[in-house]
Amino acid sequence: MKNNRLEVSSVLQGDHAVLSIETGWTANTSNHMIEVRLFDDENRIVSSVCSASPKLSLTLERPNLWNGIADPYLYIVEARLVEGGNVIAAKEATIGIKDLSFHPDLGVFLNGQPTALKGLKLPADGKTADKEANFEDLAQVVDQLHASGVQAVLVNFNQHSQDFFDLCEETGLFVWPDTKESLEQWSKHVLEISMS
């Protein structure tokens, strides 16, 4: 997931996940270090790493997986820039660790399980496309999506706010980018529905 705080991605490898974190910071002196900690949903540190590099990776054994609406489990990634033992800057992001794949004939697989999805294309001129929209309005839209049975949304990433993407991930909605390749996957594997 990419956001204005951190760029975080994950890959499942057997019974563990490898997270790649890009902080955007540069350790300018030998006194600078970048610490990254991963917290579970009970605010326990489950993995950590420290380096002078702005790009770090860490491993998490037996992660709890993000499983859509059924269990949208999220971890918090916290990065801190430390100078001489003092924290001089901090950033954080959330991530749902998952394995999402597409089979040409069998459809969408989430964490190895076939997953039937109902989806909705969101217009570029709606409430979610307003990058200045307030959080309450966005939460209301996400609630309406859930009430309509929507499990996935097709959006143009350049036209929607980070708060909207965060709400979707927190509540288990799949977010599908509006690209040529994604549109092909969407049309093959998502049952498109309308808002009720």
Image (tube, rainbow, N blue to C red):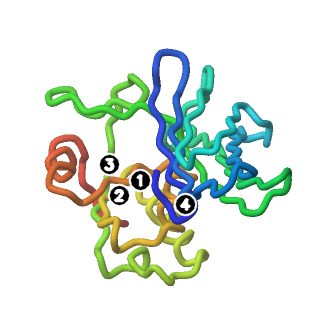
The kind of residue on which mark 2 rests is: Val
Q: Residues within 10 Å of mark 4 (few under 14, many from 20)?
A: some
**Quadrant of residue 120 in the image?**
bottom left
Name which quarter of the figure residue 106 lies in: top left
- Secondary structure under the numbered disc 4 in the rendered image: helix
Amino acid type for the residue under numbered disc 4? Leu
**Front tag of 3 and 4:** 4
Disc sitting over residue 153 in the figure = 2
Q: How many marks?
A: 4
Disc 3 versus disc 4: distance between alpha carbons? 18 Å
Which amino acid does the dot numbered 1 rest on? Answer: Gly
Tell me the CA gap for discs 3 and 1: 7 Å
Task: Tell me the residue at 59%/32% (across/down).
Answer: 58
Marks 3,4: beta carbons within 8 A:
no
Mark sitting earlier along the chain (3/1): 3
Is the C-beta separation of discs 3 and 1 under 8 Å? yes
Tell me the residue that label 3 is attached to: 118
Q: Position of residue 4 (x, y in %)?
A: 52, 65
20, 187: nearer the viewer: 20
Amino acid under disc 3: Lys
**Which residue in the protein does label 4 denote?**
167
The mark that comes first in sequence, 3 or 2, is 3
Q: Which residue is mark 1?
A: 149
* Other residues around mark 2 within 10 Å, as few (<14) / some (14–19) / many (≥20): many
What whole-number distance in Å separates the C-alpha atoms at marks 1 and 4?
Answer: 16 Å
Mark 1 or 4, closer to the camera:
4
Is residue 25 rendered to the left or right of residue 192?
right
**Residue at image location 16% in from the left, 49% down from the top:** 181
Q: CA distance from mark 1 to mark 2?
A: 11 Å
